[in-house]
Amino acid sequence: EVQLVQSGAEVKKPGESLKISCKGSGFTFSSYWLGWVRQMPGNGLEWMGIIYPGDSDTKYSPSFQGQATISADKSISTAYLQWGSLKASDTGMYYCARAMIVGGIEAFDIWGQGTLVTVSS
Amino acid sequence: DIQMTQSPSTLSASVGDRVTITCRASQTISNWLAWYQQKPGKAPKLLIYKASSLESGVPSRFSGSGSGTEFTLTISSLQPDDSATYYCQQYYSYSTFGQGTKLEIK
């Protein structure tokens, strides 16, 4: 079965660091672009950026450039989203998703279940 | 950034109605547009890609059309299970989502 499984919910304080993960299975992980999407409480979807695990080529939305870092380890079929210093405004649900075509930045056909990040003092 | 604007923001319709949601791009995106359905507490689900291609397993009452800057998602005969929020997404230049349309069943 093709799937993406994300790490569990996190509760952090402002200023703390965090790295969440997204593990793929059932497909050739290194051949598909993997994206991250934020959904703040009660709000819509925001495209943060995308990575090609095959060579770690990464593209960020201008709105998220410098706010978080996307990385991947193709040897363990896992993509990551990390923050060096969290802010309360980073609170939200974070989804990883797979682009549907090998090698192309396309629509997302497979989604992880989401990781809820709560940042509060 | 390419901006995507959906209308309406909310929509209430009855079972059996034909429903149309519009998405406009701030510049041409050819047909690089997708539509998603999201239900509360769930991840989004891909419905339509390349503006008019139906994703496998999606009911045929869903259809998409348009190219350039104006696109529509149509539900030909609304069903109770279609209550959800719908998003468009452009992937012509990186990617951006529309703000969403919440569809309620009367």
Image (cartoon, rainbow, N blue to C red):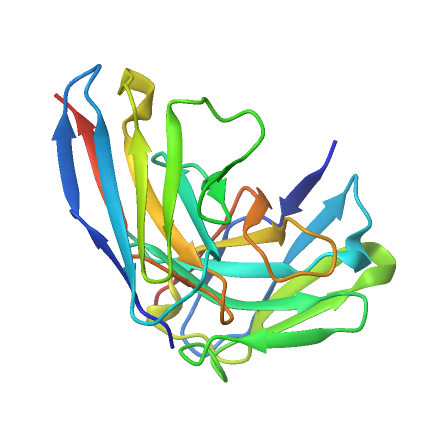
Q: Residue at x 32, y 40 (%)?
A: B73
Q: How many numbered circles are shown?
A: 0
Looking at the rendering, which quadrant does residue B55 occupy? top right
Q: Residue at x 57, y 54 (%)?
A: A96
In this rendering, position of residue B31 left or right of residue B98: right
Q: Is residue B10 visible?
A: yes
Q: Residue at x 30, y 34 (%)?
A: B74
The outermost residue toward the bottom is A66
Residue A104 image position (x, y, % from top left):
67, 61
In this rendering, position of residue B79 left or right of residue A46: left
The N terminus of chain B - image quarter? bottom left
As rendered, which of B6 and A40 lies closer to the eye? Answer: B6
Q: Is residue A42 visible?
A: no
Residue A48 image position (x, y, % from top left):
48, 68
Q: Where B21 sits versus B105, above or below?
A: below
Looking at the rendering, which quadrant does residue A34 occupy? bottom right
Q: Where A41 sits versus B85, above or below?
A: below
